[in-house]
Amino acid sequence: MKIAVLGTGTVGSTIGSRLIELGHTVMMCSRTANNEKAKAFVAKHSSNALAGTFADAAAYGEIIFNCTAGVASLEALNLAGEKNLNGKIIVDIANPLDFSKGMPPSLSVVNTNSLGEEIQKAFPEAKVVKTLNTMWCGLMVNPGLINNGDHNVFISSDHPEAKEEVKKILESFGWKPENITDLGNLSSARGTEMFLPLWLQIYGAKKSGTFNIKIVG
Amino acid sequence: MKIAVLGTGTVGSTIGSRLIELGHTVMMCSRTANNEKAKAFVAKHSSNALAGTFADAAAYGEIIFNCTAGVASLEALNLAGEKNLNGKIIVDIANPLDFSKGMPPSLSVVNTNSLGEEIQKAFPEAKVVKTLNTMWCGLMVNPGLINNGDHNVFISSDHPEAKEEVKKILESFGWKPENITDLGNLSSARGTEMFLPLWLQIYGAKKSGTFNIKIVG
């Protein structure tokens, strides 16, 4: 499949590399066409990787992974362009972490709203699927790194068919179907985004991000 | 130990019953001295249980469990009276769930603040310890009900010695020391309170509250 990865940071390159490993072709993109990190990604993956602007990648991709910083996601998607996003799945991995008021970060969208819902509202013809945003990116694409892969990922969307397509991608990453917890419609993204403050505190207590939560009982 | 339990709902009576089972005496309290639920609690537990007003119980208790609804906690503690709370540990189990705008509830204090911190600010001479607020009350007092007791409880406080005392109570409930995750100071209560929306969504997906999260990895 042709996939657009928005965001050239650690999350984007981890997701992009894993998608290429699984046989997809990936256009890694940012604000400008000649982003150094995107060029390095292409150099590493040769013919299965391309680089471009947000608009180039959104036009190219059959499915879009939003791996930008949450506070910059709407701007990046606006640059990607509504007509390039219409009808496509946007897998939204971002969290609206706001570091501008110091540590720990607060959330810029919270409580009665979520970034996932904001994106869906801004691009009503796209199909936003919120998932993977509750853990370190290394575990997103390789859950088997810990506890034999036995821990949970959440999924939220107003588009049931899009959710099923994304579940297949999650399974290709190594997620067991019984550990993909379907929370229902996209408003449940409020819950997964609001988990981030607790995630950051557990990270602080453990001094490691290589953990996840498993639902027991 | 003489313990005050503020709040006569399911959480308060579950906590109170378990404390009595463990050999403590409990004063169950509410706004009025002759609350029906408090009287029923006393009738059930005979000589180890008492009933009273918030102020009666706060004066009686060496330690205070706040099991009131989060949006009513500050009012209940004000009725309990600052002089009755000074120097004492307040184990704050409440979550600031606001059902006034419909379902799912939002949080009335969130993001850059928490109910735990609000209580500490209102009663600076008390020692607020936030814990147990991330699960169904049956599991709070009896973690062994699921997964052989192997799942996590969080604890947050600005008072390290108070935290150690509360950890001992948690251990008496059946919590294994390695599963009591110390998140540091009380501002980390923001994270545990903000977990509630996700908890409610998992509850909706599972159609059962008899679950908890276990940190793996």
Image (cartoon, coloured by chain):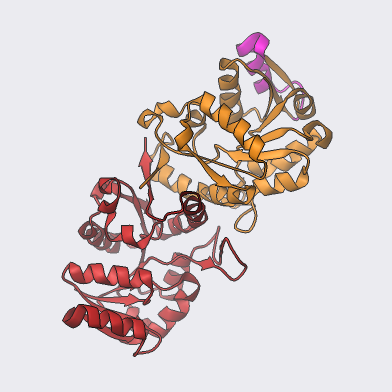
Chain colours: A orange, B red
Residue at x-position 25% and y-position 71%: B17
For residue B71, say whether it is visible.
yes
- Where's the N terminus of chain B, which quadrant? bottom left
Left or right: B197, with A16 as reference point: left
Residue at x-position 37% and y-position 28%: A148
| A78 lies above or below A41 | below
State which region is magenta: A31-48
Residue B67 in which image quadrant = bottom left
Residue B26 in which image quadrant = bottom left
Q: Position of residue A188 (x, y in %)?
A: 58, 50
Which SS does the magenta portion mostly show? helix
Left or right: A138, with A9 as reference point: left
| B215 lies above or below B121 | above
For residue A102, say whether it is visible.
no
Q: Position of residue B147 (x, y in %)?
A: 29, 45
Q: Nearer the viewer, residue B10 or A208?
A: B10
Residue at x-position 24% and y-position 50%: B177
